[in-house]
Image (cartoon, rainbow, N blue to C red):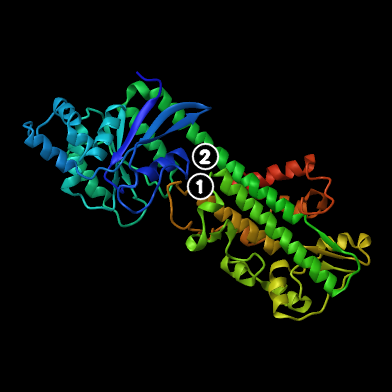
Amino acid sequence: MTSILQVAVVGHTNTGKTSLLRTLSRDTEFGEVCDAPATTRHVEGTQLLVDGEPLVALYDTPGLEDASGILDWLDEAGGGRQTGANDLERFLASPDAAGRFDQETKVLRQLRASQVGLYVIDAREPVLGKYRDELTVLGLCARPLLPVLNFVAGPHNRAEEWRDALARLGLHAVITFDSVVYDLQGELRLYEKLRSLLDPWRIPLERLMQAREREARWLRQAAAETVADMLIDVAACVMVVEGGGRQDTEKAMEALQGRVREREQACVDALLNLFRFRPSDYLGERLPLEDGQWGLDLFTPEALRHYGLRTGEGAAVGGAMGMAVDVMALGTTLGAGTAAGAAAGALLGNTLDLGRRLMHRMRGHRELRVNNNTLRLLALRQSQLVEALIHRGHGADQALKLDTPAEETWRKGSLPKPVQKARLHPEWSRLNDHAPGTESRARAQTLDVLTRVLSGDADTPA
């Protein structure tokens, strides 16, 4: 027995074999994927590692296009369509195997060199005779085959038709696994099926399953911590305008908005990297994230409406202020009365509770902060991205679908206490010029609590 389980991924052309390997290996760069037939021309391999140790080798093979021709060749060569291993050997040694059937030959040789084959099926396609011919030819390799029904997440698939057809061919062990819409349980079922077919490889497959479950838990926790860290930075961010007028305040406001946008973008980049996706994977109009940036501007009333947040009183105050930030200056506000101010006030409002507490230290100055609605909006957007990445297969090449999450914790009522606490600690924010407490124990404890809230480990906002 070889030291590593070798799995040949086989099937008709354009059934998603390469996409399946990308998803299983968490590698968006593996192979080449496009709609053209016969994109994969050679056998390519990748390994699945646990703690640095390779446990499974996956081999992407060219698409089968002329299995019927191979059966005709065998028939004409005298073996008929009731063939066996000896007939396959004769075919592989023939000039036609290296010529006319070059692609099919690569598939057959790789399957014979492997312990098992995954026969990938596009479940949206009708059951045709050519697929039965492919299974007949692959069966000559005398290796167990596990049919994998791909592209089953959409409503227009023929999964049941395929199950019935495969059962009539004696293939009752069938797995559904969508390479585009990722499902952890689907991947675990795939390895479980392989384990049932390959008893000698039971232990490494169990290790791989356990590692995948650990990875999923860690990813969700790490993603929650990444978002929590961003929220603390923004909640604790303060920009002070020392005695300036409206022009100075507007300049500071723009600077604050810029810092918040940059911090959100840093969070987006970190999440994409965490899940092994890249901003360069999502270009142009294919995604709501253009070059990794959100298409909906954080500081617009449309952003609030899109995520179901109320503008409320802040809009009126913003219209009066012409500002997009909380302003505190000896209990007074600035007058502007512009439409832009209404949008700004909706996002950054007029909450002055913390400002009043700092009044004695702020005489003659103005303090600019991000308000609660903007914090809610940030949390919604990042939580939305996390959920989308969790369920996105690395074989996906279409736009990332970002559905509005129904997260009542952030839509209504008070913010979770860790966020409220961060309001009182400007020294915790990396967005502030002087922030000696970014590595403090108190911030770390608050980060831990907020992470548990975001990851669902806390029953109620703490």
Q: Quadrant of the N terminus?
A: top left
Q: Which residue is located at x 64 percent, y 50 percent? A: 227
Mark 1 — residue?
390
The three-letter code of the residue at mark 1 reads Ile
- Identify the element where label 2 is drawn: helix
Give residue 365's position: percent from left, percent from top: 90, 66
Count of marks, rendered view: 2
> Residue 88, can we see it?
yes
**Image mark for residue 216:** 2
Camera sees residue 170 = no
Give coordinates of residue 68: x percent, y percent. Answer: 15, 43
Contact? badges 2 and 1 (CB < 8 Å): yes
Q: What residue sits 26% from the left and 45% below the top?
A: 12
Front in this rendered view, residue 225 or 11: 11
Q: Is residue 364 left or right of residue 306?
A: right
Query: In the image, residue 329 lies at what x, y percent?
Result: 88, 69
**Picture residue at 40% right of the left edge, 40% below the top:** 21
| Residue at figure coordinates x 63%, y 56% from the top left | 379
User: Neighbour class for label 1 at 10 Å: few (<14), some, many (≥20)?
Assistant: some
Task: Tell which circle, 2 or 1, labels the residue nearer the N-terminal end.
Answer: 2
- Local packing at callout 2 (Cα closer than 10 Å; few below 14, some 14-19, many 20+) is few
Relative horizontal placement of residue 439, taking residue 343 as reference (left or right) = right
Residue 175 picture quarter: top left
Q: Amino acid at mark 2?
A: Ala
